[in-house]
Image (spheres, grey):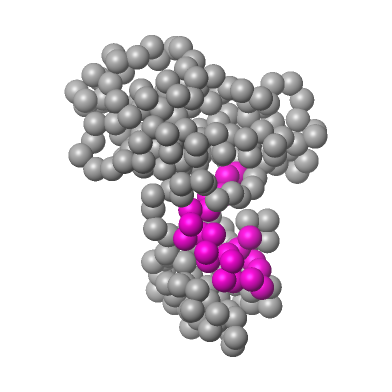
Amino acid sequence: MKYGKKYQDSVKAFDLSKQYDANEAVSIILETAKAKFDETIELHVRLGVDPRQADQQVRGVLVLPHGTGKTKRVLVIAKGAKADAAQAAGADYVGAEELIAKIQNENWFDFDVMITTPDMMGMVGRIGRILGPKGLMPNPKSGTVTMDVEKAIAEVKAGKVEYRLDKTAIIHCPIGKKSFGKEKLVENYTALMDAIVKAKPAAAKGTYLKSVTLASTMGPGVKVLPKL
């Protein structure tokens, strides 16, 4: 893979093999994020767990102290009073059968998060095969299957993120935008890392935090000193 001049210059600006503390790492990321747009800063954490084992799963949700910098479009599948409440709470789309059909028949995905009430899960489950691979399937653990749709919408709009293991035992999660500045990014990083550490499964053996890396959208990854 060929990297551009900006990327190559960024790589020379720090020691790729060194682990930095969070403050230093964020400073380097901000210096090396040279794209003309407001780059997203992402955290990548490799964990010493086996994602194939049910008792070693790591997933959870939290509202980052300063949000993610991205306004998420929320779709709520609900009826009656809950649909009215969702509309009043600022959901971007609210509906039931007609929106399920739109997703199924028109491949419509103009939303980032789907929230539904428990009574509608049977209907939503019919398109689980479409939603699952895109990470859009509502789940009680992530707070997206709930009777309190107003709270769920407010949290998503405030910058709630879901962290979860992929098949290679790595968690990928945004912690904000370059424009946030160092202080807010470090606070978001600390909140997310604390949540991941607290979510350590009892069945996990050996080193839990194998590697921690921060990277901007177009910049190189900076290794961060893991702290348990």
Judging depth in this view, the residue of 225 and 122 nearest the camera is: 225
In the rendered image, residue 184, in percent from the top left (x then y), is placed at 43, 38
In the rendered image, residue 34, in percent from the top left (x then y), is placed at 24, 31
Judging depth in this view, the residue of 177 and 3 nearest the camera is: 177
In the rendered image, residue 82, in percent from the top left (x then y), is placed at 59, 81
Residue 150 is covered by the magenta coloring:
yes
State the quadrant of the C terminus.
top right
Q: Residue at x 46, y 46 (%)?
A: 66
Q: Residue at x 58, y 29 (%)?
A: 46
Q: Eyeballing the image, is 102 above or below 3?
A: below
Q: Residue reaching furthest right?
A: 202
Q: What segment carries the magenta color? A: 143-164
Which quadrant of the view contains residue 58?
Answer: top right
Asked whether residue 97 is in view, the answer is no
Which quadrant of the view contains residue 121?
Answer: bottom right
Asked whether residue 216 is in view, the answer is yes
Q: Residue at x 41, y 43 (%)?
A: 176
Q: Residue at x 75, y 36 (%)?
A: 201
In the rendered image, residue 120, in percent from the top left (x then y), is placed at 64, 77
Q: Is residue 111 left or right of residue 51?
A: left
Q: Is residue 133 left or right of residue 10?
A: right
Q: Is residue 198 left or right of residue 11?
A: right
Q: Residue reaching furthest front?
A: 183
State the quadrant of the N terminus.
top left
Residue 119 is covered by the magenta coloring:
no
